[in-house]
Image (cartoon, rainbow, N blue to C red):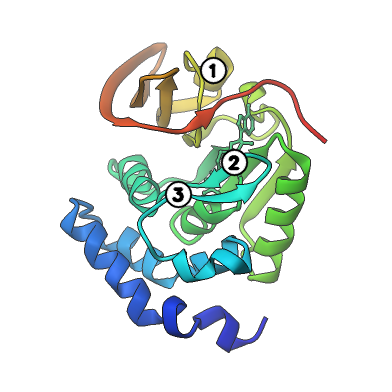
Amino acid sequence: MNDHQRNGIGMTSQRTRNRLVKRLRDNGIKDETVLDVIAQTPRHLFVDEALSHRAYEDTALPIGNGQTISQPYIVARMTETLLAAGPLEKVLEIGTGSGYQTAVLSPLVKKVYSVERIEPLQKRAAQRLRELGYRNLSLKLSDGSWGWPEYGPFDGIIAAAAPEQVPDSLLQQLADGGRLIMPVGGAEQKLVLITRHGEHFSRKTLESVKFVPFLPGVQN
Ligand code: SAH
């Protein structure tokens, strides 16, 4: 990876990225640290080259295997919400996908644990993140409904796929005071923020969203 590829030109240039950040700010994203990270993250390298000219539009884009890279607004909103109560050390991400959300979390927290259930996507994301120099990550092919108990409890849990209900295993792997944000529902989905207070979990419903379904098992 040379600087030219990383920094982008034309439709992937810093100017194009700054336009996206302005749009996110206009749409209500307030955390400037999160916006800075979005401005610095080369989203064009997380999609197919044929789509790279659209990488700084505020839309989800296909990444193969019927999945999508999340919309920048949603990545920003979920990251901002996850971090709103203060800095986080260990974060579990479910649905690595392209690795874009993982890359955005990387500079903002101490360590990211990210799982993906589709093997080709998982491999591609792991290679891409390694080549781009992200180091504070542990990635694996796994069904996120099991969480990652060896490394829990987590201060934050974030998912990019919507189950009908928040899996109990994830609640169990949330640290006391920890925050979980994920889409929940079927045809109608809402972002849900859960905070753990000992054995009590407080739940807040945020905006309507449209994510891919949270599916069981791994796929090779
Ligand atoms: N944040 C990613 C989003 C990818 S789409 C990005 O911006 O690229 C959501 C991903 O969740 C898909 O890749 C899908 O395969 C994955 N997924 C769905 N259910 C899952 C599960 N139970 N465990 C792990 N990953 C899952």
Give me the residue at 66% from left, 39% from top. Answer: 115
Give me the residue at 35% from left, 51% from top. Answer: 76
Whether ligand 1 has any atom under 8 Å from the Cβ at mark 2 is answered as yes
The answer to which of marks 2 and 1 sits earlier in the sequence is: 2
Whole-number angstrom distance, CA of label 2 to CA of label 1: 28 Å
Q: Nearer the viewer, residue 40 or 196?
A: 40
Across and down, in percent, residue 95 comes to: 59, 38
Q: Identify the element where label 1 is drawn.
A: helix
Whole-number angstrom distance, CA of label 3 to CA of label 1: 31 Å
Across and down, in percent, residue 151 comes to: 65, 35
Left or right: 21, with 5 as reference point:
left
Which picture quadrant has residue 96? top right
Of the 4 image quadrants, the one containing the N terminus is bottom right
Position of 16 relative to 65 (above/below): below
Give me the residue at 63% from left, 70% from top. Answer: 132
Whether ligand 1 has any atom under 8 Å from the Cβ at mark 3 is answered as yes
Which picture quadrant has residue 173? top right
Q: Identify the element where label 3 is drawn.
A: loop
The answer to which of marks 3 and 1 sits earlier in the sequence is: 3
Q: How many marks?
A: 3
**Which three-letter amino acid code belongs to the residue tagged 2?**
Gln
Q: Nearer the viewer, mark 3 or mark 1?
A: 3
**Which three-letter amino acid code belongs to the residue tagged 1?**
Gln
In the drawing, what numbered circle is on residue 53? none
Q: Which residue is mark 1?
A: 172
Whole-number angstrom distance, CA of label 2 to CA of label 3: 10 Å
**Which three-letter amino acid code belongs to the residue tagged 3?**
Ala
Quadrant for ligand 1? top right
Q: Which residue is mark 3?
A: 60
Give me the residue at 74% from left, 23% from top. Answer: 217
Q: Which residue is mark 2?
A: 67
Q: Nearer the viewer, residue 150 or 32?
A: 32
